[in-house]
């Protein structure tokens, strides 16, 4: 992820902006929790889809390419 931020292909946002986007479902954002299944079961946001980070490449075609994607994880 760090290289994506450094080369400016991905953007990091503050939790306040994330919260605002989540509350309004801003611009059709797709919220994906990339925690592993055990972490997701331990605690998650019920309306957010879970795709284990280790299996994300297997499910990438299930995402809408025309809508922004917001990846969430346990560590931020």
Image (cartoon, rainbow, N blue to C red):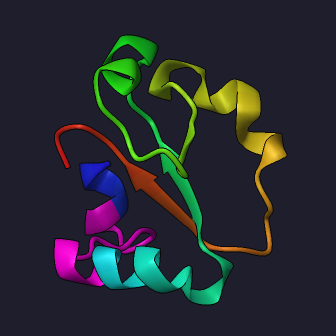
Residue 12, image x, y percentages: 28, 71
Residue 23: quadrant of the picture: bottom left
- Specify the farthest residue to the top: 38
> In the image, is 66 to the left or to the right of 43?
right
Residue 36: quadrant of the picture: top left
Relative height, residue 35 to residue 61 (above, below): above
Q: How many marks?
A: 0
Q: Is residue 22 magenta?
A: no
Q: Is residue 14 magenta?
A: yes
Give 3 or 64, whichever is nearer the viewer.
64
Say which residue appears at 29% left-offset and 21% top-offset: 42
Residue 49: quadrant of the picture: top right
Say which residue appears at 44% left-offset and 73% top-offset: 22
- Specify the farthest residue to the front: 46
Range shown magenta: 5-17
> In the image, is 12 to the left or to the right of 22?
left
Relative height, residue 52 to residue 75 (above, below): above
Say which residue appears at 50% left-offset and 19% top-offset: 54
Relative height, residue 31 to residue 74 (above, below): below
Relative height, residue 28 to residue 27 (above, below): above
Give 52 or 20, whichever is nearer the viewer.
20
């Amino acid at each position: 992820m760090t290289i994506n931020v450094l080369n400016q292909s991905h953007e990091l946002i503050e939790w306040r902006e994330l919260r605002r986007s989540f509350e309004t479902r801003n611009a059709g954002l797709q919220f994906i929790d990339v925690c592993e299944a055990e972490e997701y079961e331990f605690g998650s946001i019920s309306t957010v889809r879970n795709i284990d980070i280790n299996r994300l490449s297997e499910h990438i075609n299930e995402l809408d390419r025309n809508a922004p994607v917001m990846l969430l994880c346990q560590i931020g």
